[in-house]
Amino acid sequence: MSGDMSSPFLVSNSIASVSGDLAPQDAAWFRKIMSDCVLCPRACHADRLDGGVGYCGQTADIMAARASLHYWEEPCISGTSGSGTVFFSGCNLRCVFCQNHNIALGKAGRVITPEHLVKIFLQLQEQGANNINLVTPTHFLPQIVIALQQAKNQGLSIPIVYNTGSYESPEALRHLDGLVDIYLPDLKYFSPELSAAYSHAPDYFEIACAAIAEMYRQVLDPVMDPDTGLMQRGMIVRHLLLPGQAKDSKKILRYLHETYGDHIYISIMNQYTPLPQVADIEALNRTVTPEEYDRVLRFAERIGIEQGFRQEVPPVKALFRNLTSGDCDSLTVPLRSDNIRNPLPMPVLWFLQNFQSQTFWLPVFLFHKNR
Ligand code: SF4
């Protein structure tokens, strides 16, 4: 679904209308950055208030593809009630293997106002969401700050999760200080060759590390609800193992562990699924083997990573098991990977992926309720 172009540049009016709610430096910065966008390290200088777009493909209007309760994040995020996810259209990385490439390319979603975004946040809270989970939010950071401030004024009280590919500017992230409770950043690549080839970002590792440092400065060590086990504050860094790239993964895990130790959670993911857009890229046109994943998990164990998650169920139905929970490896028990199931056969993967595309990525009722 394309954006509602009958009401372009809604956010410019919204920025003006709510600027009284914002700190003056925030309001001035928002207007400046949207008309000469250097919000993220791409530094496109697009005039997004005037309908221009940069690498992320998005004007100043908020475009979102999905809002719903989501049950397949890490257990301390989803819990049993689900995480209140809002998927934003467009992306400033656009990885070639992206599992949501229609959303990343802005081909799925619709334009909404910040006021509508506020309603979505509040409705997700009413539905029992454990948190608000902002997925791929980077290019809409100013609009999200506005919506979060309004929603909090109207009673939004559950934790806010910022779920990002980490190609972020620390200066922009500082505007989230005090608004975001949980950071859920990826650390995708160590190698500049990989990040250049797959995300057009040879400087990805340095940029992402600086961004993650700013995120940690804001939220510090994890805080869990002792009754529910849900994360209230803190950071989970995700790393998705790519086929044939176990060495790159090990460098990332070593960096994270040496830098942050047990002050963060690390989520090691094996859900990589080759989609049709990578059919011509031989290195990406297969799943991660159990042996590759096992090698990375054993490395994590060897260097002392104990606080994190691994995926038990292969692609698509990816569920997470808490390495620290009683029914799995505990903090004091080394990581074990000998009970990880084999990935599903390719035909089953394709079926599930298609099933997922048709079932989960359609616009959902939250949008309809607000029409
Ligand atoms: S947010 Fe978009 S337009 Fe702005 S610098 Fe990043 S990619 Fe470019």
Image (spheres, rainbow, N blue to C red):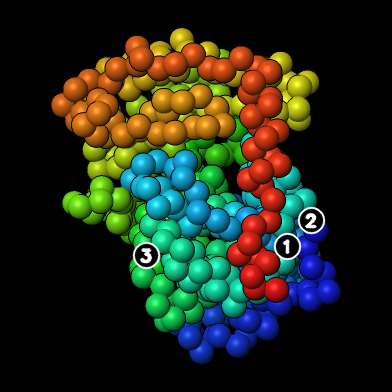
Q: Amino acid at mark 3?
A: Ile
Of callouts 3 and 1, the N-terminal one = 1
- The image quarter containing residue 129 is bottom left
Residue placed at 44% from the left, 16% from the top? 341
Q: Which residue is mark 2?
A: 1
Q: What is the spatial separation of the Cα atoms under label 3 and label 2, in whole angstroms?
A: 30 Å
Quadrant including the C terminus: bottom right
* Residues at marks 1 and 2 touching, judged by CB atoms closer than 8 Å: yes
Q: For mark 3, what is the residue?
A: 158
Q: Earlier in the sequence, mark 3 or mark 2?
A: 2
Judge left or right: residue 89 versus residue 231. right
Q: Using the image as rendered, state which of residue 113 and residue 229 is in the foreground.
A: 229
- Of residues 161 and 73, which is closer to you in this image? 73
- Label 1, on which residue? 110
**For the residues bearing labels 3 and 1, Cβ distance under 8 angstroms:** no
**Looking at the picture, does residue 192 appear above or below residue 4?**
above
- Name the kind of residue labelled 2 in the image: Met
> Secondary structure under badge 2?
loop
Mark 3: secondary structure: loop
Residue 3 % position (x, y) = 78, 63
Question: Does the numbered disc 3 mark a residue whose Cβ is under 8 Å from ligand 1?
Answer: no
Q: Tag 1's secondary structure?
A: strand
When asked about the image quadrant of residue 322, the answer is: top left
Question: Mark 1 belongs to which amino acid?
Answer: Arg
